[in-house]
Structure formats: structure tokens, C-alpha cells
Image (spheres, rainbow, N blue to C red):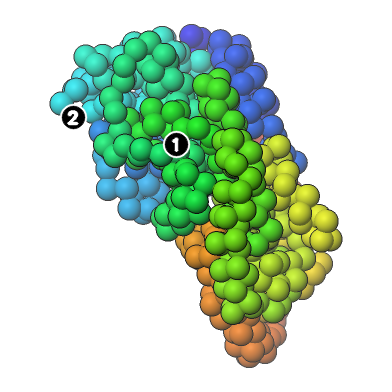
């Protein structure tokens, strides 16, 4: 382990420089796997929060699971702050380093010591140790850690910002690593039974979702003689065995590439899309029935029971308006389908997640209705859609919402206000109507505010002035050139 070269500029060295350093330090296989599982988009770096937040979230939500981060102190602070902001209320371990311990390999020894000290079987089933950008680029070899210490499983993963495009996909990095470990355990011999055992064959649900959705899915599966199995990412370790034991896997969120690889290795068929809206529910029930060998008559019975209820719920709470949809959760296409079946005119759909075969039914359904879908959409793409369409409502990430509201367009933050509602089956039909219609009804308020603040200026001219400041872009360009020259001079000193 040679450490991150001085010319890399630390964690600010740029994506290609960090990738080259990681490959040179022995991480070529890990980087190639990440590149294959999570192909890049038009932007080189994540445009949302640090992707490691996704894997951190998965570990912190699991019972009897400890988490240790290895990375720059500023990154660890930001990640732990965000995790506690989201209500984790769990301790996060941290192994600090400096230039000496990073370059000499002492950091790995410190990590190994920390893992041994934390491996207490009376407290933990597993310990997750995560390399952030700098330790990954420096080749810190977490794969050399013991697989288990005193019966406590040790799982090391690399989640660098220069290798994982979104925090949503980072959830899959850890979920897939845990499934791989659990599958190896199950293949080696008997494993612990889940706390709640379902007598009927179960369908594993892949992807985080609103808590009511698995319950609704379970009700829709009941006429098929099936049950809703565990939701992956799971909440405790032994649920992983039950997830692998399901008769099929429903890829509710379609970007869990590593997890799907483990399920397919276990011989489990994977069903795309989700029971959203009338068409989505009908197609999904048929696909599950085919994957699980359910007689056509039972599938028809399930459709006859639930489709009229979905149709009635959509009709009772229509949505009338022009809407753009964007986000980074991975369920953007499902939300767009539900909005369209509710009567909304969906103008465009953008998702930061990649195109996979598990989202193909949703893409095909939307595009057949003239609704364009953009995978790996950048922030610039999403803002451009708002500018081009001038919708009645923009649904998106925080900067998209800010951009729309600055133009007097009502907007809703996807993560907190849209994905925090049921989407599946009769319960999901109409669930978005109240918040969406309420937001669009506020257009007049935005018009009044925009008129009130008209003339106060924007950018460098923001405010009320006697003499409005003149923008000087040439000054910014001059100082930017000086900063670049200073950075290059500093790099030259370290070479």
C-alpha cells in the first residue's frame, strides 16, 4: 500500500486522478466492479449528498450492526451529522489517519485493531467498515480483514465518491455485500431462522419504501397463495436468509445491481416494476404469477379483487396539472406512472439512477404515452426541464425545488414529500393527490410573492440599491486562473 500520491491533491484531486491512484494501489478489481454495476452518467461526480450516506444509512438501520468509517475527518463529520439528522441515533466508529499512517500502511493496522476491539458477540452480529475516497484511492485493503472475529461478521466495502454515482446505489453496495456473505453462510450449513416465519411462499421486496407499501403488497399477493417477504435492505441479519429463501424477488427499486446478482446466483427469479396504478398493478401481478408458477385463475382472482379498487381510488382523487418529475431515489418512474394515471400531464421524468432492465416496463409505459425519460439526469438537465416546460408543479431534489420556486413555480421535494407516501395498489392510488393538488393551488401565492419582490435584483445585484452593482465576470475569471496556477505550483512541490 503506497498511499495517495502527493500530486493527487488529496480528496480534491479529481475523479480520474483518484481512480488512477486507486488502481495503482491495488484496487483495480474493486473499481472495475463499481464501474460495471453503477455506470457513470454525464456528470463525473455525485451531484447529491456523499454517496456513502446510502451505505451508512443501511448499516445504521440494522439491529446489532456496528459501523466504522475510514476517511477524511471532514467527510466523516458530514456523514455522521447527516445520519443523526435523519434520526439514526446510533454511534458511528471512526479510524482517523494522517499522511504517515496512510502512506506507511499503519491505517490498515489501526482499522484491524478497531475491528478486533469492537467485535463483541454479545452486542453485535456484524461490523461494517467503509472506506471513503482517500483510503480507497490509497488502496487500504479491507479485504484482508478477518471474515469473522469471535463470531461477529466483518464486512469491508469501498464507497468512494469517484466510483459510486449516487447515495441510492451505495445502499446496494452494502446490501449486496451482506447478501453475498449470508448466501455463503446458507450454502455452508444451517443458519438462524427469522424471527417471524411465513408459512406461505414469500416474495422478497427489493428497495426501501413507505412502511405501508409492503403491507399492501402482502394483501395483493394473498390471493396468489403468496406472502410479502423481507424488504431488502433488511433491518436485521437473519432477515437476509429469509430474503434469499423467497420464491421470487420484486425489484421495486430497479438499481440494486449487486443485490440482484446475489439473488440470481441463489436461483431466484427477479420481477421488474411494481404494483402502481391500474396498468402497473395488473402487469405486476401477472409477472409475479408467471415467475412463481401461480395458476392463471388465481392471478385473475387477484386482479378482479384489486384493480377495481385501484381504479376507483384514482377516479375519486384526480390530479389536473402539468408536472415535471425528477429525483435520485430510484422510484421516479413509478411516481410518474401514478401521476399520469391520476390524470396529470407528466411532461418529463429524470432520475439520477441508471437504466437497467428492471425499469424497462416503466420506461416503455411512460414513453408510449409521450413522456420522455432521462436516466442519469444531471441537475442541469432537471433545471432545464423546468425552464423549458414551465410546469404547474416541479417535483425534484432540493436545488430543483429552489430553482422552480425562484421562478414562481410551485415545487415539492421528492424525498420528503413524495416518496414518504404509499405508492402501491389501492392504498397508493390517490395518495399523492392531496399534496400535489395543494401545491399547485399555491400558484397564486407565488405570483403575489414574485410581484412583491420584483425589481430587487438577482445574483450580484440582489437587494435594493441606489446604484446597482455591475457584475464583473472578468474579475472572477482572473482570480480563478490565479487559483489554478497556485494549485499547480503546490502540486509541483510535492512531486
Q: Residue at x 47, y 43 (%)?
A: 226
Q: Residue at x 41, y 39 (%)?
A: 200
Q: Can you see residue 330?
A: no
- Where residue 279 sits, quadrant-wise, is bottom right
Q: Secondary structure at mark 2?
A: loop
Q: Residue furthest left?
A: 122
Residue 434, percent from left and from top: 54, 77
Horizontally, residue 158 falls left or right of residue 468, namely left
Q: Residue at x 59, y 79 (%)?
A: 316
Label 2 belongs to which residue?
123
Q: Secondary structure at mark 1?
A: loop
Q: Residue furthest front?
A: 297
250 over 413 or under it: above or below: above
For the C terminus, the quadrant is top right
Front disc: 2 or 1: 1
Q: Can you see residue 252?
A: yes
Horizontally, residue 266 falls left or right of residue 198, namely right
Residue situated in front as seen by the camera: 217 or 77: 217
* Upstream in sequence: badge 2 or badge 1: 2
Label 1 belongs to which residue?
201
Horizontally, residue 46 falls left or right of residue 183, namely right
Amino acid at each position: 500500500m503506497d498511499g495517495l500520491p502527493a500530486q493527487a491533491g488529496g480528496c480534491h484531486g479529481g475523479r480520474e486522478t483518484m481512480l488512477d491512484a486507486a488502481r495503482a494501489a491495488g484496487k483495480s478489481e474493486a473499481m472495475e466492479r463499481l464501474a460495471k454495476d453503477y455506470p457513470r452518467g454525464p456528470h463525473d461526480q455525485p451531484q447529491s449528498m456523499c454517496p456513502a450516506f446510502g451505505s451508512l444509512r443501511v448499516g445504521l438501520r440494522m439491529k446489532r450492526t456496528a459501523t466504522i468509517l475510514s476517511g477524511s475527518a471532514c467527510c466523516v463529520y458530514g456523514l455522521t451529522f447527516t445520519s443523526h439528522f435523519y434520526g439514526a441515533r446510533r454511534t458511528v466508529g471512526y479510524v482517523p489517519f494522517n499522511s504517515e499512517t496512510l502512506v506507511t500502511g499503519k491505517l490498515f493496522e489501526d482499522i484491524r485493531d478497531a475491528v478486533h476491539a469492537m467485535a463483541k458477540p454479545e452486542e453485535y452480529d456484524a461490523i461494517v467498515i467503509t472506506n471513503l475516497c482517500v483510503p480507497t484511492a490509497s488502496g487500504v485493503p479491507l479485504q484482508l480483514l478477518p471474515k469473522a472475529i469471535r463470531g461477529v461478521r466483518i464486512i469491508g466495502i469501498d464507497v468512494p465518491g469517484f466510483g459510486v454515482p449516487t447515495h441510492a446505489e451505495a445502499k446496494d453496495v452494502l446490501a449486496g455485500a451482506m447478501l453475498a456473505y449470508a448466501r455463503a453462510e446458507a450454502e455452508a450449513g444451517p443458519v438462524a431462522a427469522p424471527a417471524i416465519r411465513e408459512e406461505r411462499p414469500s416474495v422478497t421486496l427489493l428497495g426501501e419504501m413507505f412502511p405501508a407499501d409492503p403491507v399492501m403488497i402482502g394483501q395483493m399477493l394473498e390471493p396468489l397463495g403468496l406472502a410479502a417477504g423481507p424488504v431488502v435492505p433488511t433491518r436485521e441479519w437473519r432477515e437476509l436468509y429469509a430474503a434469499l429463501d423467497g420464491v421470487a424477488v420484486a425489484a421495486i427499486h430497479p438499481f440494486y445491481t449487486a443485490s440482484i446478482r446475489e439473488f440470481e446466483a441463489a436461483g431466484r427469479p427477479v420481477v421488474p416494476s411494481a404494483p402502481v396504478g391500474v396498468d402497473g398493478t395488473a402487469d405486476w401481478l401477472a409477472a409475479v404469477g408467471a415467475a412463481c408458477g401461480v395458476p392463471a385463475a388465481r392471478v385473475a382472482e387477484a386482479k378482479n379483487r384489486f384493480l377495481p379498487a385501484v381504479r376507483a381510488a384514482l377516479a375519486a382523487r384526480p390530479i389536473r396539472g402539468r408536472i415535471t418529475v425528477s429525483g435520485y431515489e430510484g422510484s421516479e418512474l413509478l411516481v410518474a406512472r401514478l401521476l399520469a394515471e391520476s390524470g396529470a400531464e407528466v411532461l418529463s421524468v429524470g432520475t439520477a439512477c441508471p437504466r437497467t432492465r428492471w425499469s424497462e416496463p416503466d420506461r416503455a409505459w411512460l414513453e408510449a404515452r409521450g413522456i420522455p425519460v432521462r436516466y442519469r439526469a444531471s441537475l442541469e438537465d432537471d433545471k432545464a426541464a423546468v425552464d423549458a416546460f414551465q410546469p404547474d408543479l416541479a417535483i425534484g431534489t432540493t436545488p430543483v425545488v429552489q430553482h422552480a420556486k425562484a421562478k414562481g413555480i410551485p415545487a415539492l421535494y421528492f424525498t420528503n414529500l413524495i416518496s414518504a407516501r404509499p405508492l402501491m395498489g389501492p392504498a397508493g392510488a390517490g395518495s399523492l393527490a392531496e399534496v400535489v393538488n395543494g401545491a399547485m393551488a399555491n400558484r397564486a401565492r407565488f405570483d403575489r410573492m414574485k410581484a412583491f419582490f420584483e425589481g430587487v435584483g438577482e445574483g450580484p445585484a440582489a437587494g435594493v440599491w441606489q446604484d446597482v452593482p455591475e457584475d464583473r465576470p472578468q474579475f472572477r475569471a482572473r482570480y480563478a486562473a490565479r487559483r489554478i496556477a497556485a494549485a499547480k505550483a503546490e502540486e509541483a512541490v510535492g512531486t
